[in-house]
């Protein structure tokens, strides 16, 4: 039984992954460190901002960079990203129409993301999308990000504070664009749909269904997955 749909954010709702990469590199530039697009998509896409910077610090030889600390780097990245999203961020085609379908069918929608809450809220408000989502769970609300299931379990807990009868994990469909996210959702006991916005279908084959765009997804598809 379909009871809720939980969305990843970056790469699913908005086309912002490259903006994150640009913001990371702005924060890292003073230390002579840059992340390539290939490295970002292969090794870092599913990480929270804090976990990404921790990974770079652990491998860095630059002493000044190591001294900078996580909080300073996070602040620099946040400021850069907030500037970028005001001019460059766009909603992915098909998302708004799909959200309207969920709303018309009274299916609660939530977000579970490795992004920071302020970034998510800003983008949703700028694009008039905040009204669609009952719950938002962001990076700072969990100790362990994807591929751990903590974020999805917290999202479900929050959904159940607003919905009765209780929603079970198998009643939730998660829409993701990375294997990290799919693993987290599956370990939480939820059904999964992968969109090929960031990776090829072959890399997302563990999902219950793989699609090119949300424009091709129907309520019937979701219900079939949850049977």
Image: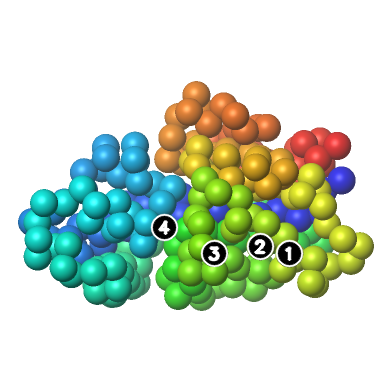
Q: CA distance from mark 1 to mark 4?
A: 21 Å
Is residue 1 placed above or below 63 in the rendered structure? Answer: above
* Tag 4–tag 2 contact (CB < 8 Å): no
Q: Which mark is residue 142?
A: 3
Q: CA distance from mark 3 to mark 4?
A: 10 Å
Instruction: Return the x and y of residue 115 as percentages of the image width and height.
Output: 45, 62
Indicate the secondary structure of the residue bearing disc 4. loop
Q: Which residue is mark 2?
A: 154
Instruction: Return the x and y of residue 221 as percentages of the image width and height.
Output: 75, 38
Q: Which mark is residue 48?
A: 4
Q: Residues within 10 Å of mark 2 (few under 14, many from 20)?
A: some
Q: Is residue 173 left or right of residue 121?
A: right
Q: Residues within 10 Å of mark 1 (few under 14, many from 20)?
A: some
Q: Nearer the viewer, residue 108 or 69?
A: 69
Q: CA distance from mark 2 to mark 3?
A: 8 Å
Q: Is residue 168 visible?
A: yes
């Amino acid at each position: 039984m379909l009871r809720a749909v939980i969305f990843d954010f970056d790469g699913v709702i908005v086309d912002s992954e490259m903006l994150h990469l640009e913001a990371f590199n702005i924060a890292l530039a003073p230390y002579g460190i840059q992340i390539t697009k290939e490295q970002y998509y292969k090794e870092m896409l599913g990480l929270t901002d804090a976990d990404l910077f921790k990974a770079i610090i652990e491998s860095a030889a630059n002493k000044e960079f190591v001294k900078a600390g996580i909080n300073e780097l996070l602040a620099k990245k946040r400021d850069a990203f907030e500037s970028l999203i005001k001019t460059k961020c766009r909603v992915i085609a098909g998302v708004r129409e799909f959200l309207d379908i969920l709303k018309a069918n009274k299916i609660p929608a939530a977000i579970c993301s490795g992004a920071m809450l302020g970034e998510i809220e800003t983008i949703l408000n700028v694009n008039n999308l905040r009204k669609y989502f009952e719950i938002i769970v962001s990076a700072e609300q969990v100790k362990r990000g994807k591929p751990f299931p903590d974020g999805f379990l917290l999202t479900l807990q929050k959904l159940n504070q607003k919905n009765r009868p209780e929603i079970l994990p198998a009643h939730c469909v998660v829409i993701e664009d990375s294997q990290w996210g799919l693993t987290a959702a599956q370990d939480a006991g939820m059904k999964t749909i992968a969109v090929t916005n960031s990776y090829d279908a072959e890399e997302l084959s563990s999902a219950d269904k793989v699609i090119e765009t949300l424009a091709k997804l129907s309520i019937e598809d979701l219900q079939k997955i949850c049977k």
